[in-house]
Image (cartoon, helix red, strand yellow):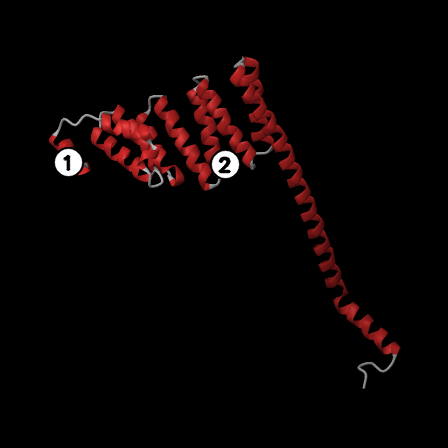
Amino acid sequence: MDAYRTEDEQVEALKRWWKENGASTLLTIVVVVGVYFGWQAWQKNKQQQQAGASAEYQQLLQVTMELEQDASDARYATASHLVDSLKTDYPNTLYARYAALMQAKLLVDQKDLDAAQEQLRWVLESKPDPELQQLANLRLARVLFAAGDAERALEQMNSADYGQFAAIYYELRGDIHTSQGDLEAARQDYQSALASSAGNPDAMPLVRMKLDSLPRDTAKDTGLANDES
């Protein structure tokens, strides 16, 4: 036997169901449609953001290439403007973070180490991916060391994850400890750099030269030399 015997009964059942459930069903439809179109708008905006950031970053790359040929104040100003624009308009993109790294390098070339530090700290504060964070930490430590603040450079590295840049981190630590006269620490750092160089110590001949050039004028150094041989 059919659930409903007549067409009229089916119509009446539908009316009752709509009276009981129609409002919530309509609300659900409205929410689903709203979410769908909202997601579509977000995707479109994201694509537009990426396209805009990419275009400005390409301009920045072009200007930095031109700076290699003619390091004029006008070109430096143009590069700085593009970096500021990327950081302001597209702060959560990789383009903005790499632009800040690029600007830091340009500022180092101009001997403006304080401003270079600001750019690198901005990258770190933007919560980049681990590899970019490691690179920004390393460059900030280098700038601090170049500015004559060896202790802060070491502190910057002490709190960092070295990751794939471990060999370069240890080399910089060795350079800093050498400048401070802490030759034993420098020796350990250079040895760690060689050990971290993808299992191929010969891949870092400069580090090997730095290690070999350290004085061995103490009994402790002599013992290390015997161990290494």
Q: 46 or 213, which lies in front?
A: 213
Confirm whether residue 54 shows in the render: yes
Q: 133 or 39, which lies in front?
A: 133
Quarter of the image where one finds residue 146: top left
- Picture disc at residue 81: none
Q: Name the residue under label 2.
A: 126
Residue furthest left as drawn: 219
Query: Dot 2, crowdedness within 10 Å: few (<14), some or many (≥20)?
Result: some
Q: Give percent across and percent down for residue 147.
A: 36, 21
Q: Name the residue under label 1.
A: 226
Determine whether 71 is above or below 224 in the image: above
The CA span between labels 1 and 2 is 48 Å
Q: Is residue 163 left or right of residue 90?
A: left
Q: Residue at x 44, y 33 (%)?
A: 136
Q: Which residue is drawn at 46% across and 37% down?
A: 132
Q: Which of marks 1 and 2 is nearer the N terminus?
A: 2
Query: Dot 1, crowdedness within 10 Å: few (<14), some or many (≥20)?
Result: few
Confirm whether residue 169 shows in the render: no
Q: In which quarter of the image is the C terminus?
A: top left
Q: Give percent across and percent down for residue 140.
A: 40, 29
